[in-house]
Amino acid sequence: SKPPQHPKTRLQEWAQGKGLPLPDYKLSGQKGPDHAPTFDITLYVQGYEPVTAEGRSRQAAEKAVAEKFFLLN
């Protein structure tokens, strides 16, 4: 069996399979102290409502928002 796919990779392949442009991840906010910020990322996929999630790093927030997209759609 193959290892589970990273959510961002899965989302990109899903979008390409549907003939959609690549998903667009935008930083929509940052809060907290400089030594421990929290990042808000909004994900845009053509034809779908934007989805926002947060994480302790930009990468964690992007992973979280990709996972959330699949839960909602």
Image (spheres, rainbow, N blue to C red):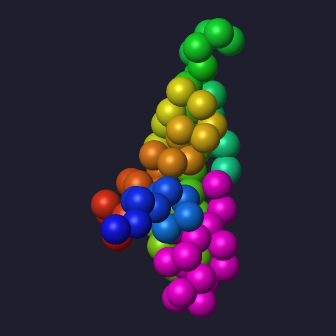
Could you say which quadrant of the image residue 8 lies in? Answer: bottom right
Of the 4 image quadrants, the one containing the N terminus is bottom left
For the question of whether residue 19 can be seen, the reply is yes
Q: Is residue 40 above or below residue 45?
A: above
Q: Residue at x 51, y 68 (%)?
A: 11
**Quick one: 4 or 45, which is closer to the camera?**
4
Residues in magenta, as a range: 11-25
Residue 56, x across and y down, in percent: 54, 27
For the question of whether residue 69 can be seen, the reply is no
Of the 4 image quadrants, the one containing the C terminus is bottom left
Q: In this view, does 42 lie above or below 37?
A: below
Q: Which residue is drawn at 50% across and 33% down?
A: 55
Residue 62, x across and y down, in percent: 56, 47
Q: Which residue is drawn at 60% across and 19% down?
A: 37
**Quick one: 52 or 71, which is closer to the camera?**
71
Residue 7, x across and y down, in percent: 47, 58
Magenta span includes 21: yes
Magenta span includes 26: no
Q: Which residue is drawn at 61% across and 41% down?
A: 59
Residue 42, x across and y down, in percent: 57, 51
Q: How many marks?
A: 0
Q: In this view, does 18 lie above or below 15?
A: below
Could you say which quadrant of the image residue 35 lies in? Answer: top right
Residue closest to the far front? 1
Q: Is residue 63 above or below residue 36?
A: below
**Quick one: 71 or 32, which is closer to the camera?**
71
Decide if residue 34 is on the left or right side of residue 63: right
